[in-house]
Amino acid sequence: MVKKLSAEFLGSLLLAASVVGSGIMVTILTQDIAIQLFVNTITTVFMLFIIITLFSPISGAHFNPLVTAAELFYKRISIKEAGFYVLAQVLGTASGAVLANLMFNKKAIEQSTYTRSGNYLFLAEVVATAGLLMIILLLQHQKRGSMAAVVVPAWIGAAYIFTSSTSFANPAITLARTLSESFSGISLKSVPLFILAQCIGAVLGVLIASLLTAQKKEEDVFA
C-alpha cells in the first residue's frame, strides 16, 4: 500500500507541477494566448506520458479521484484503498502547485483570480471528463491498458485544444490550480461548477463504456 500511495502522490505532484509550472512560465514569457495554450498543453501531455509509463505498474496511475471512483465502482479497489488514493492525489497535486510556485520565486500559495464560469465551460468539462473515463475503461476492457500512456495523454492534449475549458477533467488538479495566479489557474469560486461538471462527465463516461462493452444477449433482435 505504501508503494501505491507513494506512486499516486508523486505522480500527482509531478502532474500538477507541470501544469502549474508551465502556466507560470508562459505567463512570464508571453501574452500570446495561443502560445500559452500550446506550451501548457505539450508540457502536460509529456508529463502524463512519463508518469503513466512509470507508475502504472505500481499503483495503476490514477492521479485522479474520478478514475479511482470508477475503479471503486467496478470493485477493483476497496473503499479504504480508494480513500487513501484520493487523499494522496489531493495532497500530491497541492504539493505540486506549491512546488511550481516556489520554483518561480513566487509565494508558496497564491490565490488565483482567474474566473472560469459559464454554461459552455460546464459543458466542456462534462465532455472532457466523459471522454477520459470512457477511454480508460475501454482500454481496460480491451486488455490494452499498456496503451494508456499514449492514448490518455493524446485525449487530454486534444481536449486542451478543442474544449473551451482546456480540459481540467480532474477534481484534484482543479483544486490545486486555485493555488496559482497564472494562465493555468482558476478562482476558488469557479471550482464547484467545474467539479460538478467533472462528476457528471465521469458518470457519463462510465455509462458509455458500459454500453459499448455490454455482453450481447441471445434474444437481442439487433444482433
Image (tube, rainbow, N blue to C red):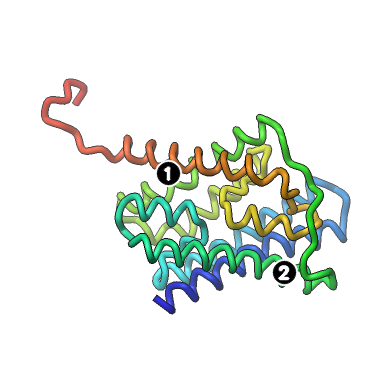
| Front position in the image: 90 or 136 | 90
* Picture residue at 74% right of the left edge, 64% below the top: 21
| Front position in the image: 104 or 74 | 74
Instruction: Say which element carries label 1.
Output: helix
The CA span between labels 1 and 2 is 31 Å
Instruction: Say which element carries label 2.
Output: helix
- Residue located beneath label 2 in the image: 98
Q: Residues within 10 Å of mark 1 (few under 14, many from 20)?
A: many
Q: Quadrant of residue 207?
A: top left
* Picture residue at 63% right of the left edge, 44% below the top: 192
Count of labels shown? Answer: 2
Question: How far across and down, in percent of the image, does residue 157 sit?
Answer: 60, 50
* Picture residue at 43% right of the left edge, 57% below the top: 68
Q: Which mark is residue 143?
A: none
Q: Nearer the viewer, mark 1 or mark 2?
A: 2
* Quadrant where the image shows the C terminus: top left
- Residue located beneath label 1 in the image: 134
Question: How far across and down, in percent of the image, does residue 107 sit?
Answer: 83, 69
Question: How far across and down, in percent of the image, does residue 147 sit?
Answer: 42, 57
172 displayed left or right of 177: left
Judged from this view, the residue extending furthest toward the top is 221
Instruction: Indicate the amino acid at tag 1.
Output: Met
Instruction: Indicate the amino acid at tag 2.
Output: Val
Question: How far across and down, in percent of the image, does residue 145 sit?
Answer: 37, 58
| Front position in the image: 164 or 203 | 203
* Picture residue at 62% right of the left edge, 45% below the top: 167
168 displayed left or right of 155: right
Lower sequence index among marks 1 and 2: 2
